[in-house]
């Protein structure tokens, strides 16, 4: 999980102030020394880490600590505010207005540029209601065009390409003409990347930008490359003057230095955070929420938003009625598992709950944890799913064999399901709380 080490290190730093009655230059200096080390370990540059700590110290020494607030709490708030400021303060949207709106996507090869283009197309199609076109302008990388077409099929978006064409500038120009003729609201142009910054790549992307005049130019960077990502961003910005940054691969074992440093170096906001291969796994970058997570405060707002995106109000009312009549079945339960899995990685979701990130740090937990439960339910007949009371010994033995599990696992699932159904029946929220309760069944 991104920032995992930084979260632990900052928590240890604040403990240095535990028991202190007030903030002094001495105890703040000791704490800030540890904070600076934590930032450096997270791959934040020395200059940015030093400036950050200097700003925190200046604000901390000027604070009159209220009697009701301990020094550690006060410093935590100051660090939270500075982290938020360092990453850009507020979430910033992209500009998709135009006839059509044009988003130019640039970055190094392997940064996740093409996958992001597909994710953005789905996001703009479903959340903004825009008729969207993807354009394949990577004429160099083998299978790049085919990859974009596969992603386009997945998200239901047309991909413009020209087989055999070798001029990306002309391809982009032709795509815009077609978009205007056919009433597309948005065009997303996926450009070629290289393994390193080179003059030919920069000249080509600059030429595309000059020709199509995009309403938004985004630079995609692999968050796992740390300070290298920041240097690459600076080189691209000097040439392209892009509008915003996209951080990819945030689900990897990344220290987070890129997220904390890019804004300070290029003075351009991080607009999206992308993780995983699922096309839905694209989030608007909220500096305050990220700061919350870094300081172990969770990110309940994002968790609720993810739940709302996947939850069907009609289904909620249906489940609420079934719960009231004590008719919630194992098939209903199975359906709710699928809803949760659509929200994203279960461990990542749980870490958004305050205090849960640390608790789950060493626990191996992902969406595959549901596999045995799913296998058991899928091995049941319709009658057994609707009425678990019929599950006698011979039926349970058959289900265990069919699902590749043990009779003990089948028994445990049925008992947990019955216990949970009783609890859920008392929940006023009905269907929405079904998703909440399912977490207790994942073993």
Image: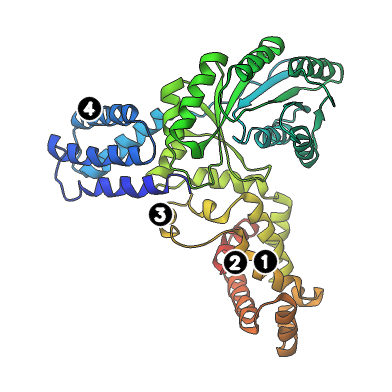
Residue 309 in sight here: yes
Mark positioned earlier in the residue sequence (3 or 2) = 3
Q: Position of residue 174 (x, y in %)?
A: 82, 16
Tell me the distance, in whole angstroms, between the alpha carbons under discs 3 and 2: 24 Å
**Mark 1 vs mark 3: in front:** 3
Q: Residues within 10 Å of mark 3 (few under 14, many from 20)?
A: some
User: In front: 272, or 430?
Assistant: 272
Tag on residue 424? Answer: 2
Say left or right for 299 vs 383.
Answer: left
Tag on residue 58? Answer: 4
Mark positioned earlier in the residue sequence (3 or 4) = 4
Q: Residues within 10 Å of mark 2 (few under 14, many from 20)?
A: many
**Residue that label 3 marks:** 355
**Mark 4 vs mark 2: in front:** 4
Q: Position of residue 409 (x, y in %)?
A: 62, 79
Mark positioned earlier in the residue sequence (1 or 3) = 1
């Amino acid at each position: 999980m991104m920032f995992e080490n930084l979260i632990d290190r900052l928590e240890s730093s604040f403990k240095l102030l535990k028991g202190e009655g007030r903030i002094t230059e001495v105890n703040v200096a000791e704490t800030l020394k540890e904070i600076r080390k934590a930032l450096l370990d997270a791959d934040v540059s020395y200059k940015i880490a030093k400036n950050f700590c200097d700003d925190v110290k200046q604000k901390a020494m000027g604070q009159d600590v209220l009697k009701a607030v301990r020094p550690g709490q006060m410093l935590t708030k100051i660090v939270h505010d500075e982290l938020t400021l360092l990453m850009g303060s507020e979430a910033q949207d992209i500009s998709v207005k135009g006839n059509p709106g044009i988003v130019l996507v640039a970055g190094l090869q392997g940064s996740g540029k093409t996958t992001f283009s597909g994710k953005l197309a789905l996001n703009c199609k479903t959340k903004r209601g825009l008729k969207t076109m993807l354009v394949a302008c990577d004429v160099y990388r083998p299978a790049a065009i085919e990859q974009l077409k596969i992603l386009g099929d997945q998200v239901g978006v047309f991909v413009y390409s020209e087989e055999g064409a070798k001029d990306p500038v002309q391809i982009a120009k032709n795509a815009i003409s077609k978009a205007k003729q056919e009433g597309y609201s948005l065009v997303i142009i996926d450009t070629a990347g290289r393994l390193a910054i080179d003059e030919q790549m920069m000249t080509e992307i600059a030429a595309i930008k000059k020709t199509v005049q995009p309403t938004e130019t985004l630079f995609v960077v692999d968050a796992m490359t740390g300070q290298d990502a920041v240097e690459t961003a600076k080189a691209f910005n000097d040439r392209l003057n892009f509008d915003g940054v996209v951080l990819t691969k945030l689900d990897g074992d990344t220290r987070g230095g890129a997220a904390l440093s890019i804004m300070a170096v290029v003075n351009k906001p991080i607009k999206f955070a992308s993780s995983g291969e699922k096309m839905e796994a694209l989030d608007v970058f909220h500096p305050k929420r990220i700061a919350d997570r870094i300081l172990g405060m969770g990110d309940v707002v994002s968790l609720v938003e993810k739940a709302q995106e996947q939850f069907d109000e009609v289904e909620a009312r249906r489940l609420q009625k079934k719960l009231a009549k004590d008719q919630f079945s194992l098939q209903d339960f199975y359906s709710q598992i699928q809803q949760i899995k659509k929200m994203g990685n279960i461990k990542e979701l749980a870490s958004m709950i305050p205090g849960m990130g640390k608790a789950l740090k060493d626990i191996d937990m992902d969406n595959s944890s549901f596999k045995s439960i799913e296998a058991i339910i899928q091995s049941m007949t319709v009658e057994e799913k609707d009425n678990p009371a019929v599950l006698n010994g011979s039926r349970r033995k058959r289900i265990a064999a069919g699902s590749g599990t043990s009779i003990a696992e089948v028994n445990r699932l049925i008992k947990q399901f019955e216990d949970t159904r009783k609890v859920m029946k008392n929940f006023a929220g009905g269907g929405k709380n079904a998703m909440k309760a399912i977490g207790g069944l994942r073993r």
